[in-house]
Image: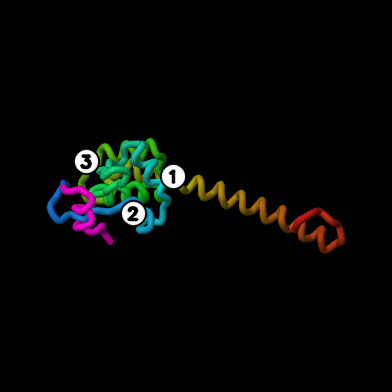
Amino acid sequence: MTMDRVALVDRGWTEGPVANEPIFTIGQLAEDFGVTLRTLRFYESRGFVSPRRQGSTRLYSQADRDRIALILKAKRLGFTLREIGLLLKGHAGTPEGLRLSRRQCTEQINLLERQKREIESALVELRQEYSTHYQRSLEGADYGDL
């Protein structure tokens, strides 16, 4: 879903990075990616994307859209914003996916595996705590919300 070029011309926005290239509004990208407007503005403030402006309207190119997709993929893979910034610098606007070295992949796998173990351990503790409360409720003791 792209913004109608006629509507853009009517608003006085005539320059385009590439002829017939799709143009997206912040609302369209937020909806398409399932993120908030604030998130996209934050990525802009970090220099991850640079939408064009027509008054107060942000107009995103296909390259901006591709970068947002890469940012969100990197986030899903557990990279920090600082790391994402470095990954994007090495990306130079190419449409391929993230270019990660074997070392980066191994380090991220190890980090995510460690986090997974920590989460699993926390779940075990919480389930034990819940079971304790449940058992006490069966015994007639009142320990608040169960």
Which structural element holds mark 3? loop
Q: Position of residue 140 (x, y in %)?
A: 87, 61
Residue furthest to the left in view is 19
- Answer with mark 1 or mark 2, whichever residue precedes in sequence: 2
Residue furthest to the bottom in view is 138
Residue 2 position by quadrant: bottom left
**From this viewpoint, is residue 108 visible?**
yes
**Is 73 rendered above or below residue 107?**
below
For badge 1, the amino acid type reads: Asn
For the residues marked 1 and 2, what is the alpha-carbon distance in whole angstroms? 32 Å
Residue position marked by numbered label 2 in the rendering: 29
Residue position marked by numbered label 3 in the rendering: 92
For badge 3, the amino acid type reads: Ala
Q: Are marks 1 and 3 in contact (CB under 8 Å)?
A: no
For the residues marked 1 and 3, what is the alpha-carbon distance in whole angstroms? 27 Å
Q: Position of residue 132 (x, y in %)?
A: 76, 56
Q: Position of residue 145 (x, y in %)?
A: 76, 56
For badge 2, the amino acid type reads: Leu
Question: Disc count in the image?
Answer: 3
Q: Residues within 10 Å of mark 2 (few under 14, many from 20)?
A: many
**Is 144 rendered above or below residue 99?**
below
Residue position marked by numbered label 1 in the rendering: 110
Magenta span of residues: 1-14
**Residue 84 or residue 17, whichever sits in front:** 17
